[in-house]
Amino acid sequence: MHKLQALAALWFPGLLICGIAAIAAMFLGAHYGAPVMLFALLLGMALNFLSQEGRSAPGIDLAARQVLRLGVALLGLRITTAQVMSLGWEPVAMVVLAVVLTIVVGIVLAKLLGFQMFFGLLTGGAVAICGASAALALAAAMPAHPQKERATLFTVIGVSTLSTLAMVLYPMITRALGMEPVAAGHFIGGTIHDVAQVVGAGYSLSHEAGDAATLIKLMRVAMLLPVIALAAWLTQRHLVAQGDAAAMGPRPPLLPWFAVAFALLVLINSTGWLPERVVQTGQGLSQICLVAAMAAIGMKTHLKDILTVGWKPVALMVAETAFLAALFYGMLVVQGA
């Protein structure tokens, strides 16, 4: 009991600061229509000095790691197997192919530009799956590295910015191309990065397009589980190759605990046993955890580190986004041919 009280006292100041930053970011996001994760990041970076202060540092570190993992696990309450099955096999096949090829292209381009494979997986996964949430989830499964938090922050900034631009541009593109509502919804759900922007763009066209976009997007979110498994497997291989596996102690499981919890919550949510209020509460808690974790990561990062990334990471994420849009549109054309 005394140990728990001591830990609570140790973590409380930092967790409280991250929670306040998360609430402020969600308020700003709701009132100004900008990505909540971006607000959380900026607020966290403005409070960067707190991560160096003795009382706050342990709680901020906990939020950046374990609270992040809890938020990812609770994302499982967004999806049911019935939603995925209702799409039919063709849209599911398109989503799987788009996610796989976008990640492969991201890894290949990252290597060509002189980055590590993991940076390509991080940016490609964020673009292909669900934006900032995917970036945070994948980063949690990747090996420790001095540049890891900097890479994660850049990816969140980049994917949030590109997602916002896509939310504005893609509905206009679908209208210019004369796409039918369902096809337009599939394109928007299959290409825009963040869930909130998909919903905004889809329903700006029509209710039918919004429903189609949301379902396709949820299928992309479901791809988070196998991609986390891939990241964890590559991490194990990397540690073995670097001779660090022994230092880690026992061999870790292929899937981190938060990925297993994610899968279990998808299955439980699919049964319909959970009351709607419980599901909504879990979804809200997931958002709070992810936003608080993003604020904590911002607190642990210096602005000058982000400003010195150069043009190559920007070019990488723009290329991944353009590839995903072109690929998905091409598949829709072939499907309709």
Image (cartoon, helix red, strand yellow):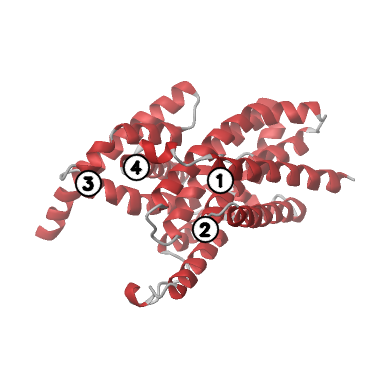
Mark 4 vs mark 2, foreground winner is 2
For the C terminus, the image quarter is: top right
Of labels 3 and 2, earlier in sequence is 3
Of labels 1 and 2, earlier in sequence is 2
Of labels 4 and 2, earlier in sequence is 2
The reply to whether the C-beta atoms of the residues labelled 3 and 1 are less than 8 Å apart is no
Q: Determine crowd level at label 2: few under 14, some 14-19, many 20+ residues with C-alpha closer than 10 A.
A: few
Q: Amino acid at mark 2?
A: Gln
- The residue labelled by disc 4 is 301
Q: Using the image as rendered, state which of residue 298 and residue 188 is in the foreground.
A: 298
Which residue: 47% across, 21% down?
A: 32
Mark 1 vs mark 2, foreground winner is 2
The reply, left or right, for residue 99 in relation to residue 252 is right
Q: Is residue 79 visible?
A: no
Mark 3 vs mark 2, foreground winner is 2
- The residue labelled by disc 2 is 116
- Label 1 secondary element: loop
Q: Using the image as rendered, state which of residue 12 and residue 314 is in the foreground.
A: 314
- Relative to 259, residue 175 above or below: above
Distance in Å between CA atoms under marks 4 and 1: 23 Å
- The residue labelled by disc 1 is 130
Mark 3 vs mark 1, foreground winner is 3
Q: Amino acid at mark 1?
A: Cys
The reply, left or right, for residue 135 in relation to residue 191 is left
Distance in Å between CA atoms under marks 3 and 4: 13 Å
- The residue labelled by disc 3 is 57
